[in-house]
Image (tube, rainbow, N blue to C red):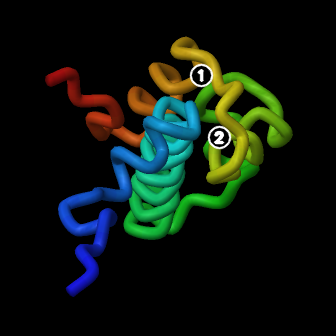
Amino acid sequence: MKRNKHIGSTLDSLFDELGEKDDVGLLTQKKLLAATVQRAMAEREMSKAALARAMNTSRTVVHRLLDPKDTGVTLATIWKASKALNVKLVELR
């Protein structure tokens, strides 16, 4: 009987072997952040333009914040959005 060498392997170990674990983790966190901001905006019936005004920034910055693939958002932008929406967007563990 042939043993399956992949039994016990995890998706994490695969990404680790490929050197992509940090990238996948970063994209996952960005998707969660974008979804949280989108949900908070919907609850407040706030448009992108209204959020941009509340953050004292441009709609382009808000668009980047809501883009789940754009990981180049700054901590300052996240902080401004958190204050404008009155929600906690980042939880440190």
Amino acid type of the residue that numbered disc 1 sits on in the rendered structure? Thr
Q: What SS does tag 1 mark?
A: helix
In the rendered image, which quarter is residue 60 located in?
top right
Outermost residue on the left side: it is: 93
Marks 1 and 2, how far apart at CA: 8 Å
Q: In this view of the protein, which residue sits in the foreground, 31 or 14?
A: 14
Amino acid type of the residue that numbered disc 2 sits on in the rendered structure? Leu
Left/right placement of residue 18 relative to residue 37 reads right
Residue drawn at point x = 51 percent, y = 26 percent: 78
Q: In this view of the protein, which residue sits in the foreground, 77 or 55?
A: 77
Outermost residue on the top side: it is: 76
**Residue 81 vertical placement versus 76 (above, below):** below
Q: Which residue is mark 2?
A: 65
Residue drawn at point x = 63 percent, y = 52 percent: 68
Residue drawn at point x = 14 percent, y = 23 percent: 93
Reading the chain from its start, which is encountered first: label 1 or label 2? 2
Q: What SS does tag 2 mark?
A: helix
Disc 1 vs disc 2: Cβ atoms closer than 8 Å?
A: yes
Residue 85 location (% of width, % of height):
41, 41
Q: In this view of the protein, which residue sits in the foreground, 79 or 5?
A: 5
The 10 Å Cα crowd at callout 1, few under 14, some 14 to 19, many 20 or more, is: some
**Residue 20 vertical placement versus 14 (above, below):** above
Residue drawn at point x = 28 percent, y = 58 percent: 9
Residue 39 location (% of width, % of height):
42, 64
Q: Which residue is mark 1?
A: 77
Query: Where, quadrant-wise, is the N terminus in this rendering?
Result: bottom left
